[in-house]
Amino acid sequence: MQYGAKRVLDINLSQVRKMFEQASPTAINLALGEPDFDTPPHIIEALKDALTMGETHYSQNKGLPELRKAIVQKLKKDNNINTTMDDIIVTVGASEALYSSINALINPGDDVLIPDPGFLSYQEVVKIAGANTIPVKTYPENGFKTTIEDVENSLTENTKAIIINSPCNPTGAVIEKEDVKAISDLADDKDIIIISDEIYEKIIYDKKHYSFQAYTDNAITINGFSKSYAMTGLRIGYLSAIPEMIDEILKIHQYNVACVDTPTQIAATDALVKSQQCVTDMVAEFRKRRDLVVKSLNEMGLECIRPDGAFYVFFKCDNPDEFIQKALKEDVVLVNGNAFGDMGEGYIRLSYAQSYDNLERAMRRLKKIVEN
């Protein structure tokens, strides 16, 4: 008997998770995109207080009003997006926001543009919806940034949506303002939906982040708390869009998860409305780690571009498979760049979401591989 439904037969499990599971308990894991910081104490206290006060019941499907109000204020202040509480859905991480958006708005047979290299979930979620993925190739000579030319070169007559991620996983590239505006204009002209994954928005160094929804109504803004507030295990995100899209996305969200757990929503509200110093401090530490890793890899002859955001370095390697296996023997876990698309061939992704000391040790171990 064939148990798998046809729509999941061609779905691939995450290569990132596969590498994570192969690692020994003592390995330095530079594969997983998870901040090593503890969740800030005031967020933990808010979570504890919510549990103590018995806040363990359902919330509204769209999320707690106080959290959605805080998200509206955040989007106005940080992203120049004017929206309302009714146009926000609180989701089980940014992943559920992505899944619900695609399954609510994309038809089987539609073409969806996805970044290449890009986060591996994009292709699989689009495939689950029965749609076709069309790669938007980005190039190292342009720092792997998505440009308007890249998007135009990938358009088809059947393009329904484009998924964009800035700062980008796996490259750390940040899209320039002029390209954000130009792609937004294109979306209006061609009636294309932009699904903008902005989960790394706060982890940005020498650039500024711009949101597509500030320039077009044909955009969905997806964000969350996992990366910026070190809340990966609490699984909370959100999306913002115009009512016509929200009404459809809510159908998938409601019958999939109903709502996000209430104590976590209360903690997320505290994350947004209280001091952001914890985010500033984390980003400053990530900057130090980035500079260490980029300098070390380039000195080894493993060429890499200094990323402008997120916490990944994408470096060139003559034989990624061999290098990754040798690194595993040295107790360092890495991910082959080809997991993120054809343009990742010949590259390796390294996550520097590890302590500075661990990164120094990892760099010494990788240096041994290069020298031998």
Image: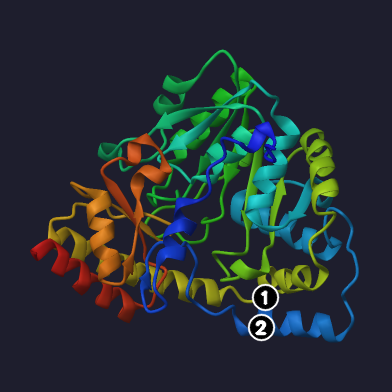
Residue 249 position in % (x across, y down): 78, 40
Q: Quadrant of the N terminus?
A: top right
Furthest-front residue in view? Answer: 1
Label number found at residue 274 = 1
Q: Is residue 64 visible?
A: yes
Q: Earlier in the sequence, mark 2 or mark 1?
A: 2
Furthest-left residue in view? Answer: 371
- Is residue 13 rendered to the left or right of residue 237? left
Marks 2 and 1, how far apart at CA: 9 Å
- Is residue 54 rendered to the left or right of residue 80? right
Q: Nearer the viewer, residue 75 or 235?
A: 235
The part of the image, by quadrant, that contains residue 144 is top left
Q: Residues within 10 Å of mark 2 (few under 14, many from 20)?
A: some
Helix, strand or loop at disc 2? helix
| Residue with the mark numbered 2 | 42
Helix, strand or loop at disc 1? loop
- Is residue 266 rendered to the left or right of residue 139? right
The part of the image, by quadrant, that contains residue 22 is bottom left
- Is residue 366 rendered to the left or right of residue 276? left
Q: Residue at x 78, y 72 (%)?
A: 266
Residue 111 position in % (x across, y down): 58, 23
Q: Residue at x 33, y 70 (%)?
A: 289
Residue 39 position in % (x across, y down): 59, 78
Q: Nearer the viewer, residue 128 or 290?
A: 128
Instruction: Name the kind of residue labelled 1 in the image.
Output: Lys
Q: Is residue 215 visible?
A: no
Q: Nearer the viewer, residue 37 or 28?
A: 28
Instruction: Name the kind of residue labelled 2 in the image.
Output: His
Q: Are marks 2 and 1 in contact (CB under 8 Å)?
A: yes
Q: Residue at x 71, y 85 (%)?
A: 45
Residue 372 position in % (x across, y down): 9, 64
